[in-house]
Image: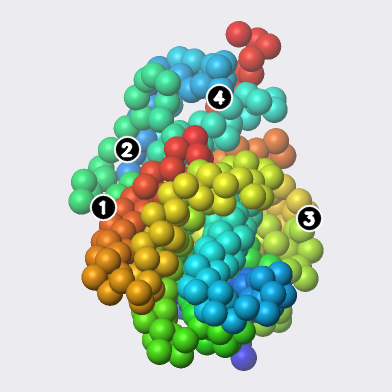
Amino acid sequence: MSGFVALIRRDLTLAARVGGDVLTVVLFFALIGIVLPFAIGPDRPLLTRLAPAIIMTAILLALLLAIDRLFRADHEDGTLAAMRFGHLPLEAVVFAKMIAQWLTTALPLLLATPLMGFMLNLPPALLGRTLIVLLLGTPALISFGAIGAAVTVTLRRGGLLAPILVLPLCLPTLIFAVGALDDTAPGSADAAFWFLAGIALLATAFTPFIAAYTLRLGSE
Amino acid sequence: MTKTAIPGANGPDQPEMAPGSSAFPPAFALGCPRLAVRSLECHRGDFAVFTGLDLNAGPGEAILLRGPNGAGKSTLLGALAGLFRPFSGQIEWLDCDPEIPLTHYLHMLGHLSAVKPSLTVSENLGFWRTLYGGTGDPDEAAFAAGLDGLEDIEAGVLSQGQTRRLGLARLLVAARPVWLLDEPTAGLDAAGEAWVAGLIARQIEMGGLVIAATHLPIALPETTTVTTLTLAGRQLQ
């Protein structure tokens, strides 16, 4: 077993044993879906129109809520420093942790999305496209979040700083993700979809290098 | 289940491992490099923690770093490990294969033990073995660290001293020639201190290089080549 797979497996094991963190993220996501229909009132067409935007916003906030712990625990118990001497380059460590983070936060959210769509009166025909857009958008959001987490890892009380720091970076992803779900304008929806795909590819490709560089600087 | 006697497991005065018994810890995969440090100056923040430091070391040597708090012992270890760049001066690791990253020659034990509380003792060691590309058996390492019988227990329930032992056992699952140790005996009992001394003595005997920062005296055998380097600290400069 390579170090890369071992690290992903370790992070999944840790998430499964601690458990509460995964549940918190999904509950936070679901709560937005429960509360907003009450706030908007009994206007089903309006809710249908807003559903994609609400789902994307809820996903963004839930992912950013969880991103702070990406490197924090490993930094605080010395694991991150010890991993610098492993056979896995720090860039690969970051990438492995991003994959594990996606599996433990984004994947549960994706699984909860059909329920969310039901609560927000999302047209069933749009659900498949929503899931595909999420499949593209969540890696981009986790990438931007990972950069924020790497920047704030040495701060004793990073807390909400990382989400606030990377929120501006995440806005294009949000805009294009919601745009790709606009079924009133198919042409611009397709363009938004490909923009989203481009952002996701670039962000995922470059983040391991940026975050690893930041982590190296942070340890000096 | 029988375990082979681990030299140093119960103190440095234990008889050496009988020839022919299973080799643990295994031999180094890489040759031991030599270290040459010339007029090194390191800064923490705005002030210089030490200046004009010279140090030469090679296979089979132990260097003990001493000095008051803030004298730069940990800073020196970090600089030697390549974790941060010195302000001026040179650190050279000679006899290294340029194709292999320096970090593959080194074990660095910081003051944090890098133990995951929700993984078991052998899961912790198994993870480091894979990540470090080591060949040492995690259960044997746990046994050597005096954690036998606790292999399947979550590391979170270990005491502070046992956690430190588990942190040290990480060095045994992957054999590497150079050990950089920061206060290796902190939090250990007398038997633990003797065990660490035995580990260091064994590492040196195998032709390794150990550089350890420590306040507590480490009782190494008389035959070991020990150089003590005392860092003066700021107030004496």
Q: Residues within 10 Å of mark 4 (few under 14, many from 20)?
A: some
Marks 3 and 2, how far apart in space? Answer: 34 Å
Instruction: Return the residue nearer the eye: A11 or B111.
Output: A11
Q: Write down the residue under mark 4.
A: B44
Residue B139 visible in rendering? no
Residue type, mark 1 in image? Ile
Q: Residues within 10 Å of mark 2 (few under 14, many from 20)?
A: some
Residue A116 in the image: state x and y as whole percent: 58, 82
Name the mark nearer the viewer: 2 or 1. Answer: 1
Task: Please give the chain letter of the residue carrying mark 1.
Answer: B
As drawn, the label of residue B189 is 3
The residue at the point 62 percent across, 91 percent down is: B1
Residue A113 in the image: state x and y as whole percent: 53, 82
Marks 1 and 4, how far apart in space? Answer: 29 Å
Marks 3 and 1, how far apart in space? Answer: 37 Å
SS state under label 2 = strand
